[in-house]
């Protein structure tokens, strides 16, 4: 698969099969992803790949909290601005319509939407998860390094025939993640990533992207 094919076929998969992912594929991907760019070559990401019983335990812990109505831990960073404005608000709404509309869930069906969202913390059925941490003193530009690294990982996963879904939702229960992973206290959880094989029996809707004219300006 060439780079264009990897970019074209990468999407956030929210239903995986239980087929295990061989470690050799993950090692090959992560070894190659180390070539992702970062400011002054800091490579500020700290990655934990979790599967088997540790991941099952993490899923159990968070599922118990969600079932008990626990809204999660104090947020350590803002995922979105306090007041999302146009055109971002419309793009987020389109994502929600595509995601829940494909499942036949009405906008006002809050309970069902919450149950569907809770699948985040089951990794959408995937048996492998990656958790990305950064040191707490890293400024915003170094978080962009982590974004470039994670995108590189996702594209390389496609080359291995694998799919993924990045999930900032894991940061909502960062203490439970830390209980299982035990990272040093100076590290902050940025996101998780579910990794596996897409379930071919379900529809994985693709969300339309903004036209080039909305996001790119050519000068000269």
Image: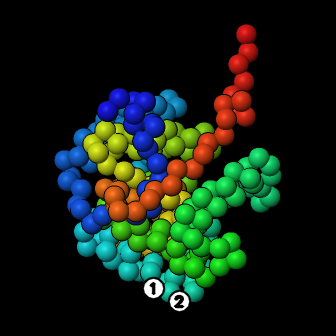
- Using the rendered image of the protein, determine whether residue 187 is visible from the camera's viewpoint: no
- Using the rendered image of the protein, determine whether residue 75 is visible from the camera's viewpoint: yes
| Residue sitting at the far top | 220
What quarter of the picture does the N terminus occupy? top left
Q: Is 139 situated above or below 117?
A: above
Of the numbered discs in the image, which one, if any, rests on residue 64? 1
Give how far apart the Cα atoms at labels 2 and 1 are.
6 Å
Q: Is 47 situated above or below 1?
A: below
Q: Determine the secondary structure under disc 1.
A: helix
How are the residues colored? rainbow
In which image quadrant can residue 94 be found? bottom right
| Residue sitting at the far bottom | 68
What quarter of the picture does the C terminus occupy? top right
Q: Nearer the viewer, residue 80 or 89?
A: 89
Position of 75 with respect to 47 (left or right) is right
Local crowd size for mark 1, using a 10 Å CA cut-off: few (<14), some (14–19), many (≥20): few
Seen at 46% across and 48% down, the residue is: 11
Seen at 23% across and 46% down, the residue is: 25
Of the numbered discs in the image, which one, if any, rests on residue 68? 2
- Residue 146: x %, y % from top left: 49, 44
Q: Is 50 situated above or below 142?
A: below
Position of 106 with respect to 172 (left or right) is right
Of the numbered discs in the image, which one, if any, rests on residue 217? none
- Residue 2: x %, y % from top left: 35, 29
Seen at 70% across and 77% down, the residue is: 108
Local crowd size for mark 2, using a 10 Å CA cut-off: few (<14), some (14–19), many (≥20): few
Q: Nearer the viewer, residue 81 or 206?
A: 206
- Residue 86: x %, y % from top left: 80, 49
Seen at 21% across and 52% down, the residue is: 23
């Amino acid at each position: 698969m060439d780079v264009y094919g990897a970019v074209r076929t990468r999407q956030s998969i929210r239903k995986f099969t239980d087929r295990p992912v061989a470690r050799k594929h993950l090692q090959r991907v992560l070894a190659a992803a180390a070539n992702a760019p970062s400011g002054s070559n800091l490579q500020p990401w700290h990655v934990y790949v979790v599967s088997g019983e540790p991941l099952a335990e993490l899923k159990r812990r968070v599922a118990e909290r969600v079932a008990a109505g626990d809204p999660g831990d104090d947020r350590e960073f803002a995922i979105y601005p306090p007041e999302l404005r146009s055109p971002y608000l419309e793009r987020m709404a389109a994502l929600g319509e595509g995601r829940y509309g494909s499942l036949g869930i009405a906008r006002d069906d809050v309970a069902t939407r919450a149950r569907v969202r809770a699948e985040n913390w089951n990794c959408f059925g995937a048996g492998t998860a990656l958790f990305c941490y950064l040191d707490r003193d890293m400024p915003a530009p170094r978080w962009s390094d982590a974004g470039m690294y994670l995108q590189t990982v996702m594209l390389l996963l496609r080359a291995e025939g694998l799919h993924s879904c990045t999930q900032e939702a894991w940061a909502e229960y960062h203490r439970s993640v830390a209980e299982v992973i035990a990272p040093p206290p100076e590290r902050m959880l940025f996101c998780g990533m579910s990794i596996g094989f897409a379930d071919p029996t379900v529809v994985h809707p693709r969300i339309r992207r903004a036209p080039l004219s909305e996001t790119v300006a050519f000068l000269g």
